[in-house]
Image (spheres, helix red, strand yellow):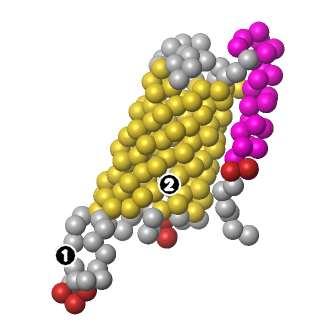
């Protein structure tokens, strides 16, 4: 059975993750929602890719805070990887693929744990699992695992900035087709 992302499965998972969070906030007497959207942008370095040496990405996501020290993530990243330009062989001039960049799309779900829950400067670690689709790089597609470390200046339930980095790698072959992202995110309340 192939792993195919379904919009219905994503919506069901999002509802499942937010329902205990709303119960937690209501019990504490806080606001009725703790779903915080974020927008991230950054640089990414392909590791063990065939000829690709740099990239950039734009990401969108939701963080669902279960408690001030724990949150769940749903993330979609749209990226581009660039390779060095190569000259076509003389006999393949007409049919040679001159495209030196490829698109990479990743969506993932996971958890984020904060080391400090009551301060404005909070370091965190997160682990996400998801799916990578790559334009024209079939071996780079599949289930990914994405551990990251970062720091944020957003208080629990508030807006702010975060900066993180890690290694997004394929679960079936962790030593091939990795991406090292460096992301700056704006977190909305």
Image side of residue 46 versus residue 60, left or right: left
Q: Secondary structure at mark 2?
A: strand
Where does residue 89 sit, x and y in percent of width and height? 21, 84
Q: Callout 2 environment at 10 Å: few (<14), some (14 to 19), or many (20+)?
A: some
Give me the C-alpha separation between circle 2 and circle 1: 28 Å
Q: Which SS does the magenta portion mostly show?
A: helix
Residue 15 sits above or below residue 77 on the image: above
- Are dots 2 and 1 in contact, CB under 8 Å? no
Where does residue 68 sit, x and y in percent of width and height? 65, 20
The circle drawn on residue 87 is: 1
Q: Residue at x 79, y 15 (%)?
A: 26
Magenta segment, which residues? 9-31
Where does residue 43 sit, x and y in percent of width and height? 35, 44
Where does residue 41 sit, x and y in percent of width and height? 40, 38
**19 drawn magenta:** yes
Q: Quadrant of the N terminus?
A: bottom right
Q: Secondary structure at mark 1?
A: loop
Q: Quadrant of the C terminus?
A: top right
Q: Callout 1 environment at 10 Å: few (<14), some (14 to 19), or many (20+)?
A: few
**49 drawn magenta:** no
The earlier-in-sequence mark between 2 and 1 is 1
Residue 171 sits above or below residue 18 on the image: below
Q: Residue at x 66, y 56 (%)?
A: 5
Image side of residue 25 versus residue 133, left or right: right
Q: Which residue is mark 2?
A: 105
Q: Residue at x 57, y 24 (%)?
A: 115
Residue 154 sits above or below residue 47 on the image: above
């Amino acid at each position: 059975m192939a792993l195919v992302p379904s919009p219905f499965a994503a919506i069901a998972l999002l509802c499942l993750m937010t329902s205990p969070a709303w119960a937690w906030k209501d019990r504490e007497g806080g606001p009725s929602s703790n779903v915080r959207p974020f927008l991230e942008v950054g640089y990414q370095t392909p590791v063990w890719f065939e000829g690709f040496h740099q990239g950039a990405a734009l990401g969108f996501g939701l963080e669902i805070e279960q408690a001030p020290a724990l949150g769940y993530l749903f993330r979609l990243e749209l990226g581009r990887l660039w390779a060095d330009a190569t000259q076509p062989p003389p006999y393949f001039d007409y049919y040679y693929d001159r495209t030196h960049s490829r698109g990479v799309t990743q969506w993932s779900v996971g958890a984020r744990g904060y080391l400090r829950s009551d301060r404005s400067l909070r370091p965190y670690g997160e682990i996400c699992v998801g799916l990578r689709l790559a334009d024209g790089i079939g071996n780079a597609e599949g289930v990914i695992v994405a551990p990251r470390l970062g720091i944020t200046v957003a208080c629990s339930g508030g807006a702010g900035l975060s900066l993180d980095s890690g290694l997004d790698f394929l679960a079936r072959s962790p030593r091939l087709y990795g991406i090292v992202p460096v992301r700056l995110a704006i977190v909305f309340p």
